[in-house]
Amino acid sequence: MRNTQDIWSYVDAKKAAFEKLADDVWDVPETCFGEHKSVALHTQALEAEGFRVTTNCGGLPTAVMGEAGEDGPVIAILGEFDALPGLSQEAGVAERREVESGGPGHGCGHNLLGAGAMLAATAIKDYLAKNGLKGRVRYYGCPAEEGGSGKAFMVREGAFDDVDIAISWHPAPFMALNVANSLSMIQTDFTFAGRASHAAAAPHLGRSALDAVELMNVGVNYMREHVPSDARIHYAITDSGGMQPNVVQAKAKVRYMVRAIELPTMWNILERVKKVAEGAALMTETTVTSQVVSAMSNLLGNGPLEKAMQANLQHLGPPPFDEQDRAFAKDMQGTFQEEDIATAYRRFGVARSDAPLGAEVVPADSPRAQLRGSTDVGDVSWVVPTVQTYGSTYAIGTPPHSWQMVAQGKAPAAHKGMTHAAKAMAATALDVLRDPAMLAAAKADFATRTKTFAYKSPLPADTKPPVVKAS
Ligand SMILES: [Zn+2]
């Protein structure tokens, strides 16, 4: 490890401004493609730091990119800033208290994710300028990670085509390398159309779209036994056709989410789900159309970059949490179930302790349980060698997508974990910028992993991002 302390000091020098950015974004929680205030805050911060700013990045009104430096390799640091619906919650209290009834909240810590990523990019920018090193660093502010697959749209539009390496992080209970084990995912709407009728006086004339949705769900539930055990199929009825039981429902819609480890398996399951939908339409004499609304690929790992990131994490050690941080985390743990805490330890393969905050760096070979979600960083990882870390920002056992996560989003511990993650990312970026052999090794590893399957965007050409106009 060379001169790592140096790049860490660049992070420390600017951290206050980015803690404020994280807090400011926490204050204006916005969801899926509606992140207008959040992207404005990120754009202002990029301009204040002298980045060359591209708004509307990848054709998305709530995406932004800032670049600094000249020539050399292009290092992308990926950030997010979208919130989740229904999780409005006061900060700093260990009890459920909404700020706005039914409003959104930062239940996945993306206020920290975006600010921490930009802090890393800023430190690299300052380092490049000070040391006359060739290389470009970019911060990508990416919208709609939650359910909208913003990055998959940006990849499809070529926003990462000239990037050499991508680096990101996610808030978590422990500091750990993010080993690539996410699932690919596709969301598809199935819309059934039938014929309305008086449900009592003329039932024989009605053809129920709601019946078709129910039969489709029954059919898919029978299919579950016959898909790979890692696959996941979820659904939500997004339009039940109306509130009147005495009217035969002429229209109904169900949204399906199919997940599998690999894209080809995911596509195969989706084709079978489509057949079940057609069967349901046949049974009910209705018609069905389907439309993919979002999709993302599984994450691809990168050996050399993961090795570099793990070395940087170990060199850094855990964030400097103090007694107050631990006391608040302990209070938060009082609101969790025992199984929440046990699951967090299993997920990271860490031996149980009494510490309420991650007090160690998780070893690369820890025996982690395979608990998989999906992330749109996956699509970036199929076009650019990518590495991610987890930063220790909240109490061990905090349920993902919960009010407890929102409550901790502005805490001093969250800020410390964010700054620490920025140091790990900046140090890894610098390793690549200073060592052409590492860059070459990362690219060679990427070439090997992508040799057997040619990446194709999981988003069909006719799927457009559901952008939300600023109000
Ligand atoms: Zn998240």
Image (spheres, grey):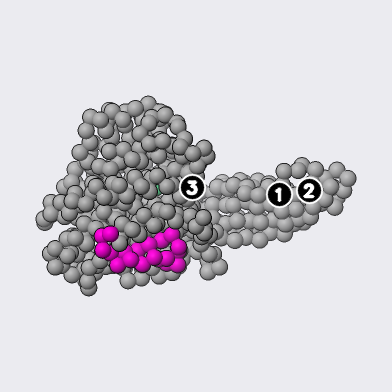
Q: Residues within 10 Å of mark 1 (few under 14, many from 20)?
A: many
Q: CA distance from mark 2 to mark 1?
A: 9 Å
Q: Where does the magenta region start and end? A: 48-66
Residue 151 point in image, percent of width and height: 42, 60
Q: Determine the secondary structure under disc 2.
A: loop
- Contact (CB < 8 A) between labels 3 and 1? no
Seen at 72% across and 57% down, the residue is: 193
Residue 164 point in image, percent of width and height: 28, 67
Residue 204: which numbered mark, if any?
A: none
The residue labelled by disc 3 is 229
- Contact (CB < 8 A) between labels 2 and 3? no
Seen at 21% across and 33% down, the residue is: 322
| N-term mark: 3 or 1 | 3
Q: Residues within 10 Å of mark 3 (few under 14, many from 20)?
A: few
Q: Amino acid at mark 3?
A: Ser
Residue 248: which numbered mark, if any?
A: 2
Residue 201 point in image, percent of width and height: 88, 45
